[in-house]
Image (cartoon, helix red, strand yellow):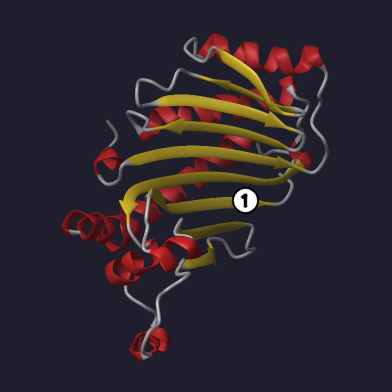
């Protein structure tokens, strides 16, 4: 199990490539792409059309950890849920990024954005918004709002975006997302829903002629790993885990 697997109920590593132009949708092209993927990862054998022109190949989900990938009209997705190691998840994303130029005719010019994503899910029955406030605190400017009688937090989803290079082409977003609905707050009837933490490092722009999707992805992964290890684990994941444990 990845070192991150002990910090949340589910952990996943995703890679997302958004293109400027529509991807090829011909039967032969799509099947060739997924056949190459299945040869590399033989357990990825469940192929289906989720929606119109949205194709998915995935492993069986009963093991608790599984790979999946999808091709949509303008997006290619690689995901690994509960990977044994981050390196294995990265290798899958890198293989796909090496594959798309010749399999799906995606040139360096066709990049709208390329993202490397860490996701962490916590299962919690209760008001996610209140839990986030207790575990992570409020921004000082909002603290006095808690003193207003009869109020309840309906939305509390901290999010920040910052650049990681002088040209602002590489951007990092850290966000905490609640699944608590107004109905649950009104009735007090909370279900076991997923509270999520995302770390998304994204490259925004076309690639330079000498750049490759795989090389950019490697740079994004290093940035994401540094952010998670240097900040997110101690300041977000551990506090959430500890507050859920004592509830």
Spot occupied by residue 110 in the image (x, y as percentages of width and height): 78, 40
Spot occupied by residue 209 in the image (x, y as percentages of width and height): 75, 39
At label 1, counting other C-alpha atoms closer than 10 Å, the crowd grade (few under 14, some 14-19, many 20 or more) is: many
Q: Is residue 141 above or below residue 95?
A: below
Give the residue furthest to the front.
187
Q: Name the residue located 73 percent from the left edge and 21 percent from the top edge.
A: 102
Looking at this view, is 204 or 178 the one in front? 178
Kindly indicate the quadrant of the structure image that contains residue 4. top left
Spot occupied by residue 2 in the image (x, y as percentages of width and height): 29, 35
Q: Name the residue located 37 percent from the left edge and 40 percent from the top edge.
A: 11
Q: Quadrant of the C terminus?
A: bottom left
Q: Name the residue located 56 percent from the left edge and 31 percent from the top edge.
A: 78
Q: Is residue 196 above or below residue 175?
A: above
Looking at this view, is 54 or 80 the one in front? 54
Q: Which residue is mark 1?
A: 203
Q: How many numbered marks have been drawn onto this rendered protein structure?
A: 1
**Does 176 sit left or right of 4 as displayed?**
right
Q: Quadrant of the N terminus?
A: top left
Q: Is residue 195 above or below residue 160?
A: above
Q: Name the residue located 16 percent from the left edge and 58 percent from the top edge.
A: 246
- Element type where label 1 sits in the image: strand
Spot occupied by residue 235 in the image (x, y as percentages of width and height): 29, 63
């Amino acid at each position: 199990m990845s070192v991150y697997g002990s910090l949340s109920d589910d952990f996943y590593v995703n890679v997302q490539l958004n293109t400027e132009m529509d991807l090829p949708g011909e039967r032969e092209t799509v099947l060739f792409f997924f056949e190459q993927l299945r040869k590399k990862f033989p357990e990825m054998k469940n192929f289906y059309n989720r929606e119109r022109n949205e194709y998915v190949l995935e492993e069986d989900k009963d093991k608790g950890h599984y790979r999946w990938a999808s091709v949509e009209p303008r997006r290619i997705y690689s995901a690994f849920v509960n990977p044994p190691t981050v390196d294995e998840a990265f290798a899958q994303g890198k293989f796909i990024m090496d594959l798309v130029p010749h399999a799906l005719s995606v040139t360096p010019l066709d990049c709208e954005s390329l993202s490397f994503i860490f996701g962490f899910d916590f299962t919690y029955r209760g008001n996610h918004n209140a839990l986030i406030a207790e575990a992570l605190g409020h921004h000082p400017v909002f603290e006095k709002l808690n003193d207003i009688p009869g109020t309840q937090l309906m939305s509390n989803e901290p999010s920040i975006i910052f650049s990681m290079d002088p040209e602002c082409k590489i951007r990092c977003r850290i966000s905490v997302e609640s699944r608590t609905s107004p109905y649950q707050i009104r009735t007090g009837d909370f279900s076991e829903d997923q509270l999520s933490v995302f770390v998304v490092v994204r490259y925004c722009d076309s690639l330079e002629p000498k750049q490759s999707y795989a090389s950019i992805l490697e740079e994004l992964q290093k940035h994401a790993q540094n952010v998670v290890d240097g900040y997110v684990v101690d300041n977000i994941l551990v506090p959430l885990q500890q507050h859920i444990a004592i509830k």
